[in-house]
Image: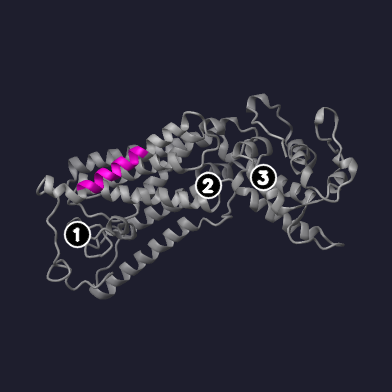
Amino acid sequence: MTDRYEPVNSQDWKQKSKEGEYSLKSLDKDWHGVFLPHLHGVTETDRGKAPHGKTRAFADIDEIDSRGTFQKAEVSKELKRMNRLELEGRLGITSNKVDDLLERAERRTVAMSTKHKAQKGEIKYKAFMEVVREYRLTTEQESTLKNAVRVFAYVEEFSCRPPTFVMGFITLLELASFIYTSTYLYTTYEVPITWTGPVPYCSALIYNPSRRWEVWRFASYMLVHIGIGHFVFNMIMQILVGVFLEMEQCGVLGSFKVLVVYMSGVMAGSLGTSLSDPATYLAGASGGVYALIAAHLATLALNWQEDSQIRIKKVVKKPITKIIRLSFIIILTLHDVGYAIYVRLYDPENRTGFMGHLCGSLAGLTVGIFILDNRRVRTWEPVVQWVSLIIFIMFMTTCVVWNVWGEEWSPGFFPPPDESLYEVGKCMNFEYM
């Protein structure tokens, strides 16, 4: 197939009535040319073309029904071959919804096949058109309330197909760790869990500045939380931001990209804190959460112009979406900065790891710019992406090198090692792993 599709600026596209825009006849004009080489059981007339090479339009729904069938694997490969800008600009679907729409159409084909049982992987063209119509009505014509929720969550449909297994697994792992820690402290030491504490200083997972040679602590601290409030806030933000960021990326590879962003924030948070506040304990998933929030800013930066040029506007692609997402990031940043200044001036005993938040955010931004999906790569964007990656690598390398040799270069910079912590120290009776 040699047909290519170019995005059409919204101002150059003549608006249709809602009824006509989402009719099968209207959708057929956009889709028939894509499916034509893959359709089976169609008449020679159906394969004909109008003058100037344009596919003939069919006014009657029965003629759309007579288009025949196609094989799911063939069309899936064809649609995935097209870049995201072609799919969104010309056909009104996003690449991470291709398999989902084809599966829905296959199930509908089976339901429609009364006389002849449909073969596995065989889909009726009309069934697919109906599924696309429903999908576009769902994602483009919603109530004000649903629009607002979609805009905030940055999601087209409230489904997890394919499942967002990375954020789901991390969240369940952190939940299990929190429940176990809380239960253990109460049953063994009669220390109740409260909204603000206690701090599990003796945990083998918390980042302990006196035991930096236990390198797993630089990552495992994300599994330890200080009180119910700390845990609940992190989990809400993680689900609200992380799950929908993962849904926006493409397939299993997209889930892996989100995992890389999350863990880069976790690692950057602990390493950055070890240099800025070398005596501070660190607990919680805030570094990873702030990395996810900043990663949304990265996707905005990468796809700002593309979102403005999409012919068929999804709810999540509307200009108000970018404003809301950007405002959310700015407000959260200003709150964190303001609260950090207040704590430093008026509550010096507060040991909240603000540097972990900052370093996590910078990691999410730099790694996100480099690794997250980019709909169309412009000539200058690879330069920005590689510069972002280099900045992140330089930061992480500096932190690692200083953690290894910093005490030799600046004696007393880090707290003295406490190798007896679990032998004769305050944690000698602590059996938690």
Q: Residue 173 location in percent, x, y?
A: 40, 63
Mark 1 or 3, closer to the camera: 3
Eyeballing the image, is 121 above or below 185?
above
**Quadrant (top left/top right/bottom left/bottom right) for the C terminus:** bottom left
- The foreground one among 293 and 56 is 56
Dot 2 falls on a residue whose secondary structure is loop
Quadrant of the rendered image containing residue 371: top left
Q: Name the residue under label 1.
A: 211
Magenta stretch in the rendered image: 390-402
> Farthest residue in the bottom direction?
188
- Residue 391 is inside the magenta segment: yes
Q: Residue 211 location in percent, x, y?
A: 19, 59
Amino acid of disc 3: Leu
Q: Residue 125 location in percent, x, y?
A: 78, 49
Dot 1 falls on a residue whose secondary structure is helix
Dot 3 falls on a residue whose secondary structure is helix
Q: Residue 105 vs residue 221: left or right?
A: right
Alpha carbon of mark 1 to alpha carbon of mark 3: how far? 52 Å
Quadrant of the rendered image containing residue 94: top right
